[in-house]
Amino acid sequence: MSRDDARDTRQVSGVTTDRPQVKYPFEFDGRWVLRYHIPYTVEHEGCTHRIVATIFAQPSVHGRIQVNRDGRLIAEYDELVPGSVVEITGDVWRVTEVAYRTRVVLERVLEQTKEEAGAQAGE
């Protein structure tokens, strides 16, 4: 490789993309597939959040999602099955699938009902 080719390579490798930064880079069409034991990193309000899903088989297949902020556990959702609702960095998600030792699939909840928000009857 000539000296000019090396300079061209350095210039190309320093190019930044114009892609917008997104909160959930793994979300596609309102769905987010959390792979078993794969940590996901989300930047939100100046903090680094790590999200990890675990799936269990007993007593029946169910999942757990742990949310850490800057290395500290801030939320844990256990006994997750399809229909369960979780909040991650201020956004509400509904569990649509739990596949043993494979994945937990979330879909974004656009409008939350009082029941989903945990409001008591008569409020």
Image (cartoon, grey):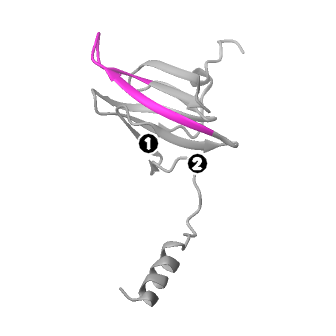
Residue 2: name its quadrant: bottom left
Q: Which residue is mark 1?
A: 32
Q: Which mark is residue 23?
A: 2
Q: Residue at x 46, y 90 (%)?
A: 4
Residues at discs 1 and 2 in contact (Cβ within 8 Å): no
The answer to whether residue 52 is magenta is yes
Q: Which mark is residue 109?
A: none
Question: SS at mark 2?
Answer: loop
Q: Is residue 89 above or below residue 58?
A: below
**Is 113 displayed left or right of 63 in the figure?**
right
Looking at the picture, tell me which residue is in the foreground, 22 or 14.
14
Magenta residues: mostly which secondary structure? strand
Amino acid type, callout 2: Lys
Q: Which residues are magenta?
A: 48-64
C-alpha separation, residue under disc 1 versus residue under disc 2: 12 Å
Q: Is residue 17 above or below residue 8?
A: above
Question: SS at mark 1?
Answer: strand
Q: Is residue 117 above or below residue 30?
A: above
**Position of residue 112 measured from the top left corner of the image (x, y, whole percent):** 60, 32
Looking at the picture, tell me which residue is in the foreground, 87 or 102.
102
Residue 110: name its quadrant: top right
Looking at the picture, tell me which residue is in the foreground, 115 or 95.
95
**Position of residue 47 measured from the top left corner of the image (x, y, whole percent):** 66, 39
Q: Residue at x 55, y 65 (%)?
A: 19
**Is 67 displayed left or right of 99 in the figure?**
right
Amino acid type, callout 1: Trp
Q: Residue at x 44, y 87 (%)?
A: 3
Q: Residue furthest right?
A: 123
